[in-house]
Image (tube, rainbow, N blue to C red):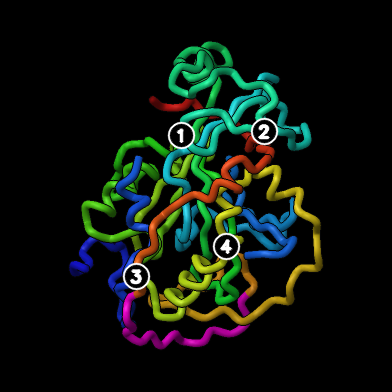
């Protein structure tokens, strides 16, 4: 890999130039009953939600994560009913994980193909604004500074996907292209999510911070070797929240990464310096979405506002 000049924080501690196992997904358009996600909000906070319940305090304004998996293409979702922030999670009337055609489990398919769908037309949204069928990206991430290796889902709304570059802060689609042009993949670096303070909606941008430590790289490898990780990209938020609740694990000590990254959700008690060691890169597997997961049913509970989508 090339020398890093794109990062916000040059590291004083040796880090690992990890070989990507998801680079192919950039160039293209944890198990058990515990399911975790990080919820975006209008209050510019990142809330940790486990089995539908918020756990611990929220992080504010920014959050450092390691993106370990994502769908090849943005997903889509359509609700016929008007948005109600107090309603319980329900299945969308129509949705697509690949942005090409509705999922088999959709009860009210709007078209045979997303490209020809009347809900995929500007002006079809509420009040004649945007599109009625909305984009989102569901990411599987690790939280920088959390040594547990727990995977979380983050659902990125349409307004955060296609926004313009602002001082090396990108919408997700632009961020993928920027990193690809810099010859670095998303699963090889720490990424900072930054709220747009000028936006009226829960809008975030993406910025590279540094290479991974050896310990972080090992956690990424373990997550990508776990077949349960793919669920976090395939299942909608309602499905993640509806998982059967089990007792939350006891807090564990966080391990400080270079430039003093610690668990932003406040579970850390002691900080142990990371001592990364150079290691051989693993071969990259072929990225392939498993057919048995492609039609998984789920439900999406809209966040606190609606956003206009971009073409």
Q: Please name the residue shown 32% across and 81% down the image.
A: 280
Q: Please name the residue shown 55% across and 76% down the image.
A: 147
Q: Give how far across and how far down residue 232 sits, in percent.
A: 59, 53
Mark pair 3, 1: CA separation: 35 Å
Q: Residue 227, relative to residue 173: is it above or below?
A: below
Q: Quadrant of residue 41?
A: top right
| Secondary element type, mark 1 | helix
| Secondary element type, mark 4 | helix
**Which mark, residue 283?**
3
Q: Residues within 10 Å of mark 4 (few under 14, many from 20)?
A: few
**Which mark, residue 227?**
4
Q: Label 1 belongs to which residue?
A: 159
Mark 4 touches mark 2? (CB < 8 Å): no
Q: Label 2 belongs to which residue?
A: 105
Q: Residues within 10 Å of mark 1 (few under 14, many from 20)?
A: many
Mark 1 touches mark 4? (CB < 8 Å): no
């Amino acid at each position: 890999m090339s020398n890093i000049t794109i990062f916000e924080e040059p590291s004083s501690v040796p880090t690992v130039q990890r070989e990507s196992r998801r680079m192919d997904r950039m160039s293209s358009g944890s198990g058990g009953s515990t399911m975790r996600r990080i919820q975006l909000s209008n209050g510019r906070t990142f809330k940790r939600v486990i089995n539908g319940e918020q756990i611990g305090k929220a992080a504010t304004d920014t959050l450092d994560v390691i993106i370990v998996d994502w769908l090849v293409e943005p997903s889509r979702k359509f609700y016929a009913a008007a948005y109600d922030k107090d309603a319980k999670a329900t299945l969308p009337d129509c949705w697509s994980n690949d942005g090409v055609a509705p999922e088999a489990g959709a009860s009210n398919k709007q078209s045979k193909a997303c490209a020809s769908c009347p809900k995929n037309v500007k002006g079809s949204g509420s009040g004649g604004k945007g599109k009625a069928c909305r984009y989102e990206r569901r990411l599987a991430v690790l939280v920088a500074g959390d040594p547990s290796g727990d995977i979380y889902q983050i659902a990125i709304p349409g307004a955060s996907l296609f926004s313009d570059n602002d001082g090396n802060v990108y919408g997700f689609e632009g961020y993928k292209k920027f990193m690809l042009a810099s010859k670095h993949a998303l699963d090889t670096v720490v990424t900072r999510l930054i709220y747009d303070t000028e936006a009226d909606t829960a809008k975030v941008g993406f910025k590279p911070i540094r290479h991974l430590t050896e310990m972080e790289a090992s956690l990424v490898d373990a997550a990508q070797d776990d077949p349960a990780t793919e669920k976090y990209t395939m299942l909608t938020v309602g499905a993640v929240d509806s998982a059967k609740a089990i007792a939350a694990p006891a807090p564990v000590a966080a391990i400080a990464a270079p430039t003093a990254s610690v668990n932003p959700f406040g579970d850390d008690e002691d900080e142990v310096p990371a001592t990364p060691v150079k290691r051989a890169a693993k071969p990259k597997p072929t990225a392939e979405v498993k057919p048995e997961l492609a039609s998984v049913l789920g439900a999406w509970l809209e966040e606190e506002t609606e956003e206009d989508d971009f073409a």
